[in-house]
Amino acid sequence: GEDVEQSLFLSVREGDSSVINCTYTDSSSTYLYWYKQEPGAGLQLLTYIFSNMDMKQDQRLTVLLNKKDKHLSLRIADTQTGDSAIYFCAESPKGNTGGFKTIFGAGTRLFVKA
Amino acid sequence: DVKVTQSSRYLVKRTGEKVFLECVQDMDHENMFWYRQDPGLGLRLIYFSYDVKMKEKGDIPEGYSVSREKKERFSLILESASTNQTSMYLCASSLTRNNEQFFGPGTRLTVL
């Protein structure tokens, strides 16, 4: 079945790089996403990658996609205390509902130490 | 600026009460979703709707129903609230194009 897995907790020091990893099961997904949830707020799309790409870079964010291993990662360079949040990996598998259903992982809580 | 609003940020209800959670989006999105978020479990899809008056069950629909009478509004109904429905409820909407979902701030529901 459809499943997205990620570790629940990551702690880094301010200024270091953070790498959040995720594995997914459905190879039919056209898009893979990273969402960010700050305390007391809903989720907000951080970045996404097409399944035909291996890498996407956007300022401090780098997304790597390994389709063979169904592995997605998010790297945050020069991590700041404001990056402390929960990060959700997600995929949109194709199906008879038109492919717009999104499967979310459990979320990785990133804790940045000053 | 895109916006998804939810009727309440915090709600406290008693077991057996009927509960309505309202969600409104101003982006003319076709798709709307209701999730519940629990620690360690992430987001679980309760129901979604891809058009007015259309609805489909998600992964955990038991104990819930939904209503979508207008494109911009998607309501979640707990017919008879139970303590195991204490949770954070998140509403989202999306266009089919790239499936980016826009989330509301959430409603934290406590059932006593």
Image: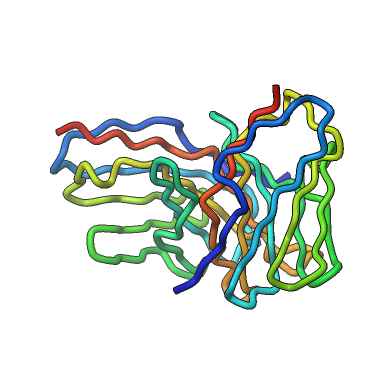
Labels in figure, total: 0
Q: Could you say where residue A11 lies in the image, as x and y percent from the top left?
A: 28, 31
Q: Could you say where residue A28 lies in the image, as x and y percent from the top left?
A: 65, 62
Please name whichever residue, A17 or B46, is drawn nearer the observer in this view of the structure: B46
Residue B88 sits in quarter:
top right
Q: Quadrant of the N terminus of chain B?
A: bottom left
Q: Could you say where residue A61 lies in the image, as x and y percent from the top left?
A: 29, 58
Establish if B107 lies above or below B29: above
Please name whichever residue, A30 or A86, is drawn nearer the observer in this view of the structure: A86
Please name whichever residue, B73 or A62, is drawn nearer the observer in this view of the structure: B73
User: What residue do we see at 65% from left, 41% from top?
Assistant: B36
User: What residue do we see at 57% from left, 59% from top?
Assistant: B5
Q: Is residue A50 left or right of residue A38?
A: right
Q: Quadrant of the C terminus of chain B?
A: top right
Q: Is residue B92 left or right of residue B1?
A: right
Q: How is the image coloured?
A: rainbow
Please name whichever residue, B27 or B15, is drawn nearer the observer in this view of the structure: B15
User: What residue do we see at 36% from left, 51% from top?
Assistant: A74
User: What residue do we see at 64% from left, 64% from top?
Assistant: B24
Establish if A87 lies above or below A46: above
Establish if B67 lies above or below A98: above
Residue B79 sits in quarter:
top right
Q: Could you say where residue A37 lies in the image, as x and y percent from the top left?
A: 43, 47
